[in-house]
């Protein structure tokens, strides 16, 4: 019976298998990115970036209809432009990154909305806003998988400077020039993961599979490596349970996945080994030394 | 002795206001130099200039065939995110950056050097602890361990012994003396005149303008210290442009 509920949707329906593959790919890329976003205090930057992508995708939609390639390219261009401009401005003028990013993503959003309304088309942006992981065709699935692969490979390359820049930026500046490029590449990785995410979860929830798993991981480990593993694992678990839940109850898939992740997060806040509420209430007797 | 660092009419500052004004002189290779002066005298600014964090407003710093990135620098206020989940041993290993770069592996000999550096600063047993669990003094020891691993020929320490108990300060001072004995060039900004007199052969007394530079006993005279204290700390917002011809003549 339990097996029926948990496995039957995937053995019976190809679209569920595709959705599962997509969610696993999203988790592999988004998990580590989310951990770095959290550790660099950029959790909300991911959200801002998601908004910045929206107009690009909308323009792509206007120019060529529901063409995946055009929408993705538009999203990538808008996201990269905003991320890189914000990064460059904050690095060359000393304006805090959050402030410059807020400026650029609002400008990008306004520009996008302006273009859409001038064109006068009543665009159905629901697909872009909420995505549909249950309608993954081959090109989309391939795009998500390629993005996850790129993310993991590139992250391996910039891992060391990224970690040092997060913990001691001044030190990195005195020994190397790698800090700024690593940061910009990291911003680019955020963008491609958001573009992946918005095919599946929509722009509004794409950040969810990055940030929530990272938040969960923070409650279970004090070291960055296990943190990344936990983040990826909890993203995959959320995706799997979310898909089953969505299949059995007709809750839309994107929100179902994120709600499961939010549930895991709540459990971690309560029972997490590192700083969870319950372990703090019952810490046990103090140690000898 | 060859000059390791040469300051040529160097002016460093912020928003065109000088914090180090017309400094000329040379630091010999292998020197152990104390930089002293009141708060706001430009000690940290000078160090930021040396390691390349601050571009000179005028003049220049000539390094004898040395890349600014090869200098080990211990800032006064370290900009370290201590909530970041990184262990003591991983943090110290970042001192190997020049040797490993982005990809280089950390082999067996490097591991031994890391363990050695941690032992030298007395943090053995802390290897797997997160840096967030260290006390202020332990954190400073940690930073010394990283400087040790950087294996730099020039080491710049900005007020390294602040807020330290006597034992920690003595331990780390021994390390500084050891670096000197190895022939490394060490510059340290200090406030403890007794320590400077006892351990640092050379002193630069800075009060925005250089007041005196030379053998410690000749620099730290009552007259010189009094002159340094007269320095005006605040920038003058209405200050005119510093024209070379109007500059008071200074001893070379």
Image: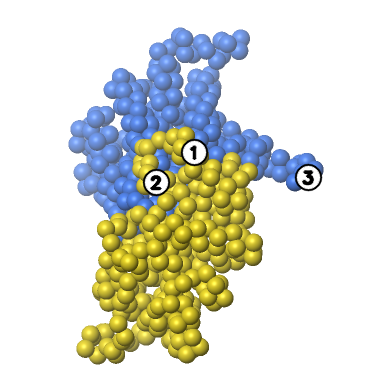
Chain colours: A blue, B yellow
Q: Which residue is mark 1?
A: B111
Q: Which residue is mark 2?
A: B97
Of labels 3 and 1, the one closer to you: 1
Q: Position of residue A269 (x, y in %)?
A: 63, 40
Report which quarter residue A25 is drawn in.
Answer: top left
| Residue A211, above or below A170 | above
Marks 2/1 same chain: yes
Q: Position of residue B229 (x, y in %)?
A: 48, 86
- Please say whether residue A173 is visible from this viewpoint: no
What is the crowding at mark 3: few (fewer than 14 residues within 10 Å), some, or many (at least 20)? Answer: few
Q: Which numbered dot is residue B69?
A: none
What is the crowding at mark 2: few (fewer than 14 residues within 10 Å), some, or many (at least 20)? Answer: some
Find numbered disc 2 in the image and state the secondary structure of the residue it sits on: helix
How much space separates mark 3 and mark 2, taking CA atoms? 38 Å
Chain letter for mark 3: A
Chain letter for mark 2: B
Q: Which residue is mark 3?
A: A288
| Residue B231, above or below A275 | below
The quadrant of the rendering that contains the N terminus of chain B is bottom left
Q: Position of residue B204 (x, y in %)?
A: 42, 76
Marks 3/1 same chain: no
Which of disc 1 and disc 2 is earlier in sequence? 2
How much space separates mark 3 and mark 1, taking CA atoms? 31 Å
What is the crowding at mark 1: few (fewer than 14 residues within 10 Å), some, or many (at least 20)? Answer: few
Chain letter for mark 1: B
- Front position in the image: B161 or A37: B161
- Front position in the image: B81 or B120: B120
Q: Are marks 2 and 1 in contact (CB under 8 Å)?
A: no
B244 vs A96, left or right, is left
- The residue depicted at 53 percent of the width and 25 percent of the height is A237
- Front position in the image: A107 or A217: A217
What is the tally of numbered marks visible in this picture? 3
């Amino acid at each position: 019976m339990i097996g029926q509920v948990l496995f039957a949707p995937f053995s019976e329906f190809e679209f569920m298998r595709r959705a599962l593959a997509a969610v696993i790919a999203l988790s592999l890329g988004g998990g580590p990115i989310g951990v770095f976003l959290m550790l660099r205090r950029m959790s909300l930057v991911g959200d801002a970036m998601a908004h910045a992508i929206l107009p690009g995708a909308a323009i792509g939609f206007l120019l060529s209809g529901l063409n995946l390639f055009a929408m993705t390219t538009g999203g990538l261009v808008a996201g990269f432009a905003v991320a890189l401009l914000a990064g460059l401005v904050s690095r060359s003028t000393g304006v805090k990154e959050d402030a410059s990013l807020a400026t650029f993503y609002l400008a990008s959003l306004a520009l996008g909305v302006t273009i859409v309304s001038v064109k006068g088309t009543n665009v159905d942006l629901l697909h872009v806003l909420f995505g549909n992981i249950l309608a993954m065709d081959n090109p989309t699935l391939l795009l998500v998988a390629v993005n996850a692969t790129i993310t993991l490979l590139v992250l391996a390359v910039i891992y060391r400077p990224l970690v040092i820049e997060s913990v001691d930026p001044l030190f990195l500046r005195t020994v190397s020039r790698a800090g700024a490029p690593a940061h910009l590449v990291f911003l680019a990785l955020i963008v491609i993961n958001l573009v992946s995410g918005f095919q599946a979860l929509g722009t509004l929830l794409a950040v969810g599979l990055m940030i929530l798993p990272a938040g969960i991981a923070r409650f279970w480990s004090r070291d960055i490596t296990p943190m990344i593993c936990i983040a990826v694992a909890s993203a995959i678990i959320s995706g799997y349970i979310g898909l089953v839940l969505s299949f059995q109850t007709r809750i839309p898939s994107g929100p179902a996945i994120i709600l499961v992740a939010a549930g895991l997060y709540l459990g971690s806040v309560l029972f997490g080994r590192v700083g969870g509420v319950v372990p703090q209430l019952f810490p046990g007797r103090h140690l000898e030394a | 002795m060859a000059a390791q660092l040469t300051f040529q009419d160097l002016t460093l500052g912020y928003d065109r206001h000088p914090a180090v004004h017309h400094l000329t002189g040379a630091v010999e290779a292998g020197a152990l130099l104390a930089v002293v002066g009141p708060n706001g005298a430009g000690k940290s600014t000078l160090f930021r200039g040396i390691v390349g964090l601050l571009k000179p407003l005028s003049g220049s710093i000539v390094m004898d065939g040395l890349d600014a990135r090869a200098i080990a620098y211990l800032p006064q206020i370290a900009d370290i995110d201590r909530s970041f989940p990184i262990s003591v041993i991983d943090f110290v290993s970042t001192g190997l950056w020049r040797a490993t770069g982005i990809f280089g592996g950390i082999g067996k000999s490097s591991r031994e050097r890391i363990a050695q550096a941690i032992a030298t600063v007395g943090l053995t047993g802390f290897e797997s602890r997160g840096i967030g669990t260290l006390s202020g003094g332990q954190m400073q020891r940690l930073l010394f361990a990283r400087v040790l691993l950087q294996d730099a020929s020039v080491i710049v320490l900005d007020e390294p012994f602040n807020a330290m108990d006597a034992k920690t300060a003595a331990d780390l001072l021994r390390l500084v003396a050891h670096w000197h004995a190895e022939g490394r060039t060490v510059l340290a900004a200090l406030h403890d005149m007794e320590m400077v007199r006892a351990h640092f052969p050379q002193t630069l007394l800075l009060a925005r303008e250089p007041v005196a530079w030379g053998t410690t006993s000749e620099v730290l005279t009552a007259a010189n210290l009094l002159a340094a204290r007269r320095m005006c700390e605040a920038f003058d917002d209405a200050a005119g442009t510093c024209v070379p011809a109007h500059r008071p003549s200074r001893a070379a």
